[in-house]
Image (cartoon, grey):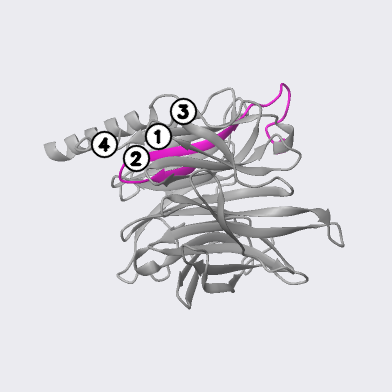
Amino acid sequence: MRSTSRTRLLALLASATLAGCTAPGQLNGRDDRAYEVSVAYIGSRPAVVWYGGTQQHEALFMRYAGSAGSPQGPVLQLTDGRRDAYEPSLQDIGGEALVAWYEQETEHLQGGARRQIALLARFDASGRLRWQRQLSAADANGRNPVVRVGGATIHVAWIEQPDGAEPAIRAASLDATGSWLQTPRSVQPVGTDTWNLNAAMGAKGVFHVLYDSGHDSRAKELHWMRVQGNHVDDRLISADDGKESAYPDIALDGGRVAITWFDRREGNAEVYLRCAQLDDGGSPPQNLRVDDGAARRVTHTSGDSTGAYVSWHEGHIELAWTEMSDQHRQRLLLQRFDRNCVALGRPRVVSSVQEQAGIPSFAATTTGFALAWDAQRRREGQPATAEPGGKGSSRVLLRVWPHRVGEGAR
């Protein structure tokens, strides 16, 4: 009993220290637009990529940071800004940056829409393009790509909608030089309201992709897709109850998995967390429903709680999400859980009270743990639901916690 109590006390102290670390570093320019950050350790350094800038069109930018989160080197512009670039996904490949994103053409198609193009590219340490591949077909809209690296193999998935057809998730794999190992192929139909993919690499080269879709359900529900070579397994993992379950994220620690999402089954959007164990083949339990009685409801707020992301950190789970405060500002919170999704300490607000916090992004390695987000200062009297283009300048913020041997997370 004494040993158990001491272990819990140490976990609570570590959680409090993690949440209450020093102020974050700002990586972008003071007057820039900046949205949809993605963080990863590139080599041994944390790096953050985002879209925005000061030009007419949105471009992608990246900056490296030191072990304490302070900026290192200049802001690197990755795209030329001739057309809008959106929603980057960042990974390490051989100590260099691998980025998936999509761009939108400036010219309108027949019917008033603009063509969207899903892309993947590798950049060296100075931001110079090594190679680039177009993921989506020329006669289709491609958007929201997510990329992960397993060993020497690049795995990527995105949403693609050919002209006059229903959208579907497509997947492909490449080697480090950008050569196709498996060319793009459709793996699963989705609804027109599917807007986000999140993914993790598992054992034996299994590419796990989580997404929401209302394609065959009364409301958007959660799906878990596993891609391994030519084999694709897609499962519905939330109950078809007519209440929206959306924006899932997944993190793996060996065979242990943590999944988060927001669910409207209580009337407004609340964040949930579910832990499970994969089998020896890397598959989730048969007939798994993550929104069952084992799911942890994390938030209990009158306003919406959304934008949840999850990561493993030294054997524990870190969960970050956004929620509306009493001052009608969107704030970012961080909370730690054990391997069974039991909370270790209370959630802590990590964003500034003067700013609107954007969606968070996690990265973890053997040398450190990083949390990045964008923060927007609203003009006086501007509603919290205003479009990004009307919010003015915003900041890219990064917090880094180095690992300390023998001391746990700090």
Give percent across and percent down for residue 97. 49, 50
| Pointers 1 and 2 in contact (C-beta within 8 Å) | yes
Mark 3 lies on residue: 24
Mark 3 or mark 1: whose residue is earlier in sequence: 3
Give percent across and percent down for residue 361. 49, 43
Q: CA distance from mark 1 to mark 4?
A: 19 Å
| Pointers 4 and 2 in contact (C-beta within 8 Å) | no
**Picture disc at residue 11:** 4
Region of the chain picked out in magenta, as a range = 361-387
- What residue lies at 65% left-to-right and 31% top-to-bottom? 32
Mark 1 lies on residue: 400
Q: CA distance from mark 3 to mark 1?
A: 8 Å
Depicted 25 relative to depicted 123: above or below:
above
Q: CA distance from mark 3 to mark 2?
A: 15 Å
Looking at this view, is 225 or 88 the one in front? 88
- What residue lies at 33% left-to-right and 29% top-to-bottom? 17
Mark 3 or mark 2: whose residue is earlier in sequence: 3
Give percent across and percent down for residue 7. 19, 38
Magenta span includes 188: no
Looking at this view, is 23 or 152 the one in front? 152
In the rendered image, is residue 337 in sight? yes
Mark 2 lies on residue: 368
What SS does tag 2 mark? strand
Q: CA distance from mark 4 to mark 2?
A: 18 Å
Q: Residues within 10 Å of mark 1 (few under 14, many from 20)?
A: many
